[in-house]
Amino acid sequence: DTAVSQTPKYLVTQMGNDKSIKCEQNLGHDTMYWYKQDSKKFLKIMFSYNNKELIINETVPNRFSPKSPDKAHLNLHINSLELGDSAVYFCASSPRGEQYFGPGTRLTVT
Amino acid sequence: GIQVEQSPPDLILQEGANSTLRCNFSDSVNNLQWFHQNPWGQLINLFYIPSGTKQNGRLSATTVATERYSLLYISSSQTTDSGVYFCAVVQGGGGADGLTFGKGTHLIIQP
């Protein structure tokens, strides 16, 4: 069974569109995260979400919004996509210790 | 925020060689993890090691929290060890804070 899964694996879209990436974990963890990996492979935290407490990295534009329908899911919604949003987005989950990562979603904005 | 520095940035070795990767961090940490990002982009958990020493097969890791560094040892390298190795930490205080990553060590193992 996949522990942390993301859909889609690849996403190609045009500037100005709105898109969502879904994340699900079946580990029973309380905390979930979204990370962005840029073209130079640098990984940076975007959001963490725990029991309805949202911690936002202040460098993340407000076009990005996490949505959690329940404890096992944390989706990432992006409005008005820009070229600079092209990256690999990773979801992760944690029982408040070790973090476990999903396979990533490669987003390409044209 | 906390700074994480990894060295060396790039490393090219022959199959069978041993290597040591270093991670320095600028403040106390609650969490330290080592990851391997393989050529397909997957982030694979290697060690969760905020302090002490752990071993898993040909890999081992040591974190000296009081001196703010961690080392990852790879012995008898294989071509499948190629990829980028990341060190990542959560600063003291923990909670739901995300990991701060280093820039990684890009390892190439040649046959």
Image: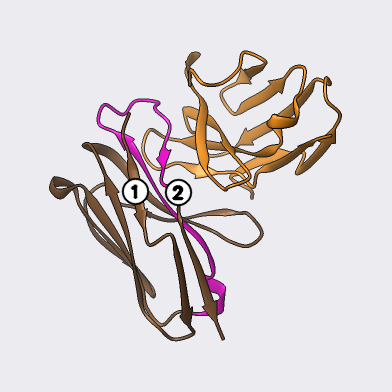
Mark-to-mark CA distance, 2 and 1: 7 Å
Question: Magenta includes A59?
Answer: no
Does the residue at mark 2 contact the one at mark 1 (Cβ under 8 Å)? Answer: yes
Q: Helix, strand or loop at disc 2?
A: loop
In the depicted structure, whether residue B88 falls above or below residue A76: below
Tell me which residue sits at (75%, 25%) in the image.
Answer: A82
Q: Chain of mark 1?
A: B
Q: Colour of chain B?
A: brown
Where is residue A96, by image quadrant? top left
Q: Nearer the viewer, residue B73 or B48?
A: B73
Question: Magenta includes B97?
Answer: yes
Q: Nearer the viewer, residue B6 or B29?
A: B6
Residue denoted by label 2:
B103
> Which range of residues does the magenta coloring cover?
B78-102
Which mark sits nearer the N-terminus, 2 or 1?
1
- The disc placed on residue B5 is 1
